[in-house]
């Protein structure tokens, strides 16, 4: 089966994933846009109204007009070769495929569309934000003893990025924890690029804060 796969960026609703955090995969039976933490979107040929060129300031790509109720109306894949990409999508046969999809493909698309594109459980997001803010503001609120400077160069300023680093790592290496924070049907590999990026950023912040505070 002829299939194309591209790496780029994406807009999903008001969210944006920069290159290389979005991947587009198309064959004659499905179009899949994995925008990491923004969501993993699956489309049948019959879900697509049209695919058109998209342009904005310093941005170009393709806009996927669709009829899937659970997805954001704005779905854009950002790439420099947008005109050529539309032709290559057409060449897969996806846009003109009116045949019945294989049962396994239909079941997979239906499953992902039913659970929505955002991969994390909202309860997990709320818990993460609460703990992050508690750790980051802990010194100001006096939870970690006295801090005369009241800056991020403090115990709380070290604990917050350490927590975020370990949270991301646990999703990758622990299947039970990943099931606890991800919606049913989503997998850690769907957002692995974002998790590695989060670990790199928070790991760097932890090291820098630790060095400066000593």
Image (tube, rainbow, N blue to C red):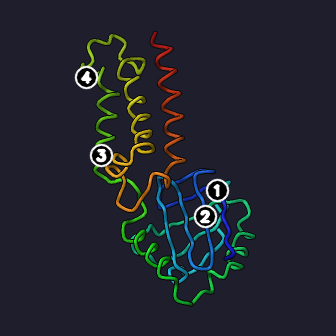
Q: Are marks 3 and 4 in contact (CB under 8 Å)?
A: no
| Residue 187: % across, % down | 44, 56
Residue 61's place in the image compared with 198, above or below, is: below
In the image shown, does 17 or 91 lie closer to the viewer? 91
Q: Residue at x 41, y 56 (%)?
A: 119
Kindly report the distance in space between the C-alpha atoms of the residues bearing marks 1 and 2.
Answer: 8 Å
Residue 43's place in the image compared with 204, above or below, is: below
Left or right? Give the position of 174 relative to 34.
left
User: Around disc 1, counting alpha carbons within 10 Å, would you say few (fewer than 14), some (14 to 19), or many (20 or more)?
Assistant: some
Q: Are marks 1 and 2 in contact (CB under 8 Å)?
A: yes
Q: Are marks 3 and 1 in contact (CB under 8 Å)?
A: no
Q: Name the secondary structure under disc 3.
A: helix
Q: Are marks 2 and 3 in contact (CB under 8 Å)?
A: no
Specify which label sits upstream in the sequence, 2 or 3. 2
**Furthest-bottom residue in view?**
99
Left or right? Give the position of 163 relative to 76.
left
Say which residue label 4 marks. 141
The dot on residue 126 is 3
Kindly report the distance in space between the C-alpha atoms of the residues bearing marks 3 and 4.
Answer: 20 Å
Q: Residue at x 41, y 28 (%)?
A: 162
Q: Residue at x 50, y 66 (%)?
A: 74
Residue 140's place in the image compared with 75, above or below, is: above
The dot on residue 8 is 1
Specify which label sits upstream in the sequence, 3 or 4. 3
Say which residue label 2 marks. 24
| Residue 193: % across, % down | 54, 47
| Residue 11: % across, % down | 54, 59
Specify which label sits upstream in the sequence, 3 or 1. 1
Camera-side mark, 2 or 3: 2
Camera-side mark, 4 or 2: 2
């Amino acid at each position: 089966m002829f299939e194309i796969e591209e790496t780029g960026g994406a807009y999903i609703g008001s969210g944006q994933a920069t290159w290389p955090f979005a991947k587009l995969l198309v064959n004659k039976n499905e179009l899949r846009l994995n925008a990491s933490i923004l969501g993993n979107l699956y489309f049948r040929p019959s879900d697509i109204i049209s695919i058109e060129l998209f342009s904005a300031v310093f941005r170009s790509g393709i806009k996927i007009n669709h009829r899937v109720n659970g997805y954001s109306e704005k779905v854009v894949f950002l790439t420099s070769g947008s005109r050529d990409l539309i032709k290559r999508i057409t060449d897969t046969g996806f846009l003109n495929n009116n045949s019945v999809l294989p049962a396994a493909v239909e079941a997979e698309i239906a499953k992902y569309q039913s659970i929505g594109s955002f991969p994390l459980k909202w309860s997990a997001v709320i818990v993460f934000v609460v703990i992050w803010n508690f750790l980051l503001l802990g010194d100001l609120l006096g939870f970690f003893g006295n801090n005369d400077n009241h800056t991020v160069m403090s115990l709380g300023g070290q604990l917050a990025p350490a927590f975020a680093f370990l949270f991301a790592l646990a999703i990758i290496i622990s299947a039970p924890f990943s099931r606890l924070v991800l919606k049913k049907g989503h997998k850690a590999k769907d957002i692995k690029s974002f998790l590695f990026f989060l670990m790199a950023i928070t790991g760097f912040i932890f090291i820098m804060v630790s060095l400066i505070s000593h």
